[in-house]
Amino acid sequence: MRQLTAPSLTFFALTLGLLLGHARAQSPDAAKYQSPSGAQAATGARASDVVSIDSIIDAVYDVISGPAGRKRDWERMRSLFVPGARLMPTSPVRPQGTAPDAPLKGDEPLKTNVLDVEGYITRGGPYLEEHGFFERESARRVETYGHIAHVWSTYESRHEAEDPKPFARGINSIQLMNDGARWWVVSIFWEQETPRTQIPKKYLKSAR
């Protein structure tokens, strides 16, 4: 996800745009938790969005992505997150008046913003809908135990889906929970790449 200054998480403004051919990796244990068909009718979530780790990660990226002028499906986004979920971008503190996608110098101080889903929609929604923004996953690492999973998701952000190069990259640390019927996002904690914090090569490719 990206900066949420407007929004401080590009993640939310949380990368996953059309998710065109992004690399996937899922641990063997993760495959055990496939939700029963139609199990989440009571929550309003699409069955196809919450049936597996793959599907819910895809849905998160997809729901925030789109061309300028397209209204995002915020009800769909709400359906992906457990009540009380948090979105937490760690981002440089840009000088007043600096554009949210202006190049970073690398020496800016950092801060972490803690938002709930409604706070993210209120703060980041207008930016996402007024500007073209597509975020997609480029690599993934997954750890699972019992009914919980940690997804280390490397992302790329673009203004247009066809842009050859992203204007931002970073890593989303995504925590998930399976309640026996479906997957939920519990939290997303992320940081955008800067000249001083370049993404290590090992996180630019998926691993099981």
Image (tube, rainbow, N blue to C red):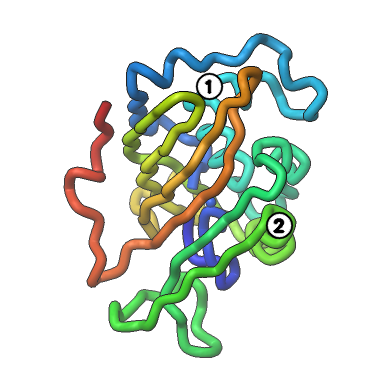
Binning the other alpha carbons within 10 Å of mark 1 as few (below 14), some (14 to 19) or many (20 upward) gives many
Q: Residue furthest front?
A: 146
Q: Position of residue 157 (x, y in %)?
A: 44, 53
198 and 111: which is toward the camera: 111
Q: Secondary structure at mark 2?
A: helix
| Residue located at (43% from left, 49% from top) | 172
Mark drawn on residue 121 = 2
Whether residue 29 sits left or right of residue 185 in the image: it is: left
Amino acid bearing label 1: Ser
Mark 2 or mark 1: whose residue is earlier in sequence: 1
The residue located at (42%, 38%) in the rendering is: 150
Q: Tell me the CA gap for discs 2 and 1.
A: 24 Å
Q: Position of residue 70 (x, y in %)?
A: 71, 49
State the residue at coordinates (30%, 80%): 105
5 left or right of 136 in image:
right
Instruction: Kindly indicate the quadrant of the structure image that contains residue 118.
Output: bottom right
Q: Give the residue at x 36% y 28%.
A: 24
Amino acid at dot 2: Ile
Above/below status of 197 relative to 52: below
Q: Specify the quadrant that holds the C terminus.
A: top left
- Local SS, label 1: loop
Q: Which residue is mark 1?
A: 52
Nearest the eye: 34 or 49: 34
Please say if 112 is above or below 50. Answer: below
